[in-house]
Image (cartoon, rainbow, N blue to C red):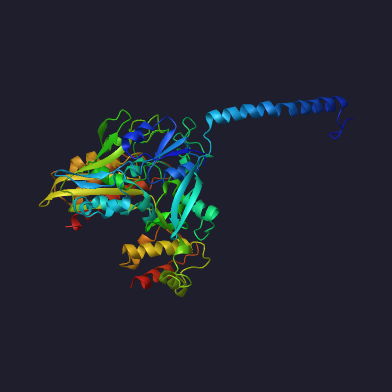
């Protein structure tokens, strides 16, 4: 009786010739696929972009699909802005565009020519921390620290916008920044401290 | 994201010339970029409208005109809007987060997709995302779903807060179609119910662009409320929301507007309840009856039965709150 492990001579010849035939297909298949690709799929497009990030001018070539967050982290090496959800729900990627807080994960880099971008790396003055950074340290405004760059960028904007009238107002205007460690009380205290 | 070609026209006229079957527009990008990342929207070409459309809020004798590119924060904090249409301002500030409001445009707010979690989950069937594939929510987890105006094809709700205020204020949508003609669409007719074609959210013609919103001046800036009930106090979609405004003469309701979010595929007006309250006294009992009239027309689903008492209470409370604004 045959076991599952033994192969007949016929099986061997049939399968090996099938594989041999396969070897000749790729060239024609490849060229066919290329034709289809050229005809039906849009090619990657790169566009020159000049933009100011943390007061430094950059001349870049960006793929149209690149988000500002990926541009910062992958192309320029500014990894302070964090990728939490990548869908605009957590606020970890918050940066300032022309002084206003924005979500860098939902911003296409090609839409930014001439804009001034500030990230967490651009907040301190040399070795001197921004008052909001100092306040976060003083008030335990974080635990694991992952959401912190986004929290601080948002907090700086919150003070600038003047939404610091009460704890409730601060919480309402900081609701776009989630903290899974729930350091919210420290964050609120930091903002109150800087605002007064 | 699928590769796409990017173009940035300087005028709305050149923008519509770039329109084509596989072209999509982008303004704030808060919904569009998200949908592109999920491969739900896959345009071959993206036309950036940020330089083509107006960022102005202009005051005329009988109406206020809001350029389509005015962002949500600017609109909500504009002094003229706060004075003439404070309900609109309140509704906008109840929506999204400060970051998203900074990015999102007025036109884009109308065009964010009517959606539910099944629309966003590409492993699930969804007639809106993939026509003919079925509705995953109908017999699924439909806690957030619609309670009125839905069909077996789609039970999603329109997520905007701004649009609820705009439908209550009888706004008009100014559009530019691909023939280069300007048209005005009544706000209540702009979004559509799902019916047999849930893949289409609104009545904006193919390739057309929203250029502005017009709101006629009214007397609803004293007694108004936008009440939003949600799972957490901030930055969440409405379970139900109510936009209510009264034009009072003594204790008599001369005119009234009542609309809701979180209940339908489009911003929903409660016309029957409005007719009931018109020329009546503003009393707790009348408000209660009006709420009962509205809720009589809804039909809840397996997991959103709670919306019936919640909506009834919210309508009553919103109407009551209109009076305490005096």
- Above or below: residue A193 compared with residue A84: below
Question: Which of A60/B23 is in front?
Answer: A60
- Above or below: residue A43 compared with residue B102: above
Q: Is residue B307 visible?
A: yes
Going 64% across and 28% down the picture, which residue do you hit? A31
Residue A183 vs residue A27: left or right?
Answer: left
Residue A65 locus on image (x, y percent) = 49, 44
Residue B304 locus on image (x, y percent) = 40, 45
Residue B26 locus on image (x, y percent) = 39, 41
- Above or below: residue B271 compared with residue B104: above
The quarter of the picture where residue A9 lies is top right
Total count of labels: 0
Question: Which of B170/B117 is in front?
Answer: B170
Residue B250 vs residue B85: left or right?
Answer: left
User: Among all residues in the image, which is located at the extreme bottom?
Assistant: A138
Residue A124 vs residue A26: left or right?
Answer: left
Going 25% across and 32% down the picture, which residue do you hit? B183
User: Among all residues in the image, which is located at the extreme left?
Assistant: B250
Question: Which of A6/A128 is in front?
Answer: A128
Question: The C terminus of chain B lies in which quarter of the figure?
Answer: bottom left
Going 47% across and 29% down the picture, which residue do you hit? B132
Q: Is residue B288 visible?
A: no
Question: Which of A178/B282 is in front?
Answer: A178
Residue B317 locus on image (x, y percent) = 26, 53
- Above or below: residue B310 compared with residue B46: below
């Amino acid at each position: 009786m045959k076991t599952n492990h033994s192969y007949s001579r016929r099986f061997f010849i049939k399968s090996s010739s099938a594989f041999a035939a396969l070897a000749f297909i790729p060239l024609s298949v490849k060229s066919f696929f290329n034709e289809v690709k050229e005809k039906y799929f849009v090619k990657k497009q790169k566009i020159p972009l000049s933009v100011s990030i943390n007061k430094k001018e950059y001349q870049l070539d960006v793929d149209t699909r690149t988000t500002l967050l990926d541009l910062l982290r992958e192309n320029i090496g500014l990894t302070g802005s964090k990728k939490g959800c990548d869908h605009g729900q957590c606020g970890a990627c918050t940066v300032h565009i022309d002084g206003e807080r924005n979500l860098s994960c939902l911003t296409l880099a090609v839409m930014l020519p001439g804009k001034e971008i500030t990230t967490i790396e651009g907040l301190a003055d040399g070795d001197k921390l921004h008052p909001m950074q100092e306040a976060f340290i003083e008030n335990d405004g974080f635990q694991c620290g992952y959401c912190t760059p986004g929290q601080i960028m948002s907090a700086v904007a919150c003070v600038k916008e003047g939404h610091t009238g009460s704890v409730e107002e601060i919480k309402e205007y900081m609701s776009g920044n989630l903290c899974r460690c729930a350091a919210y009380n420290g964050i609120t205290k930091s903002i109150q401290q800087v605002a007064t | 994201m699928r590769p796409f070609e990017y173009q940035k026209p300087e005028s709305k006229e050149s923008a519509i010339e770039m329109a084509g079957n596989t072209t999509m527009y982008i303004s704030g990008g808060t919904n569009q970029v998200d949908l592109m990342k999920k491969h739900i929207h896959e345009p071959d070409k993206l036309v950036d409208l940020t330089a083509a459309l107006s960022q102005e809020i202009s005051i005329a004798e009988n109406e206020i005109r809001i350029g389509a590119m005015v962002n949500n924060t600017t609109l909500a904090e504009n002094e003229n809007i706060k004075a003439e249409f404070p309900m609109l301002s309140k509704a906008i500030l109840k929506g999204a987060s400060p970051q998203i409001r900074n990015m999102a445009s007025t036109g884009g707010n109308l065009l964010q997709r009517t959606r539910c979690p099944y629309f966003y989950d590409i492993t699930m069937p969804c007639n809106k995302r993939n026509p003919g594939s079925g509705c995953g929510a109908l017999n699924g987890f439909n806690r957030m779903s619609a309670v009125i105006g839905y069909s077996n094809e789609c039970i999603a709700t329109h997520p905007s807060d701004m649009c609820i205020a705009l439908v209550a204020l009888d706004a008009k949508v100014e559009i530019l179609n691909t023939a280069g003609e300007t048209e005005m669409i009544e706000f209540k007719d702009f979004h559509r119910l799902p019916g047999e074609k849930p893949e289409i959210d609104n009545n904006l013609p193919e390739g057309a662009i929203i250029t502005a919103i017009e709101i006629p001046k009214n007397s609803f800036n004293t007694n108004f409320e936008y009440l939003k009930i949600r799972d957490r106090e901030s930055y969440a979609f409405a379970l139900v929301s109510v936009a209510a405004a009264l034009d009072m003469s003594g204790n008599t309701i001369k005119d009234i507007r009542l609309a809701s979010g979180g209940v339908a595929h489009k911003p929903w007006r409660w016309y029957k309840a409005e007719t009931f309250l018109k020329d009546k006294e503003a009393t707790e009992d009348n408000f209660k009856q009006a709420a009962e009239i509205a809720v009589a027309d809804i039909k809840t689903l397996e997991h959103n039965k709670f919306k019936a008492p919640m909506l009834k209470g919210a309508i009553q409370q919103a109407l009551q709150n209109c009076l305490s604004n005096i």
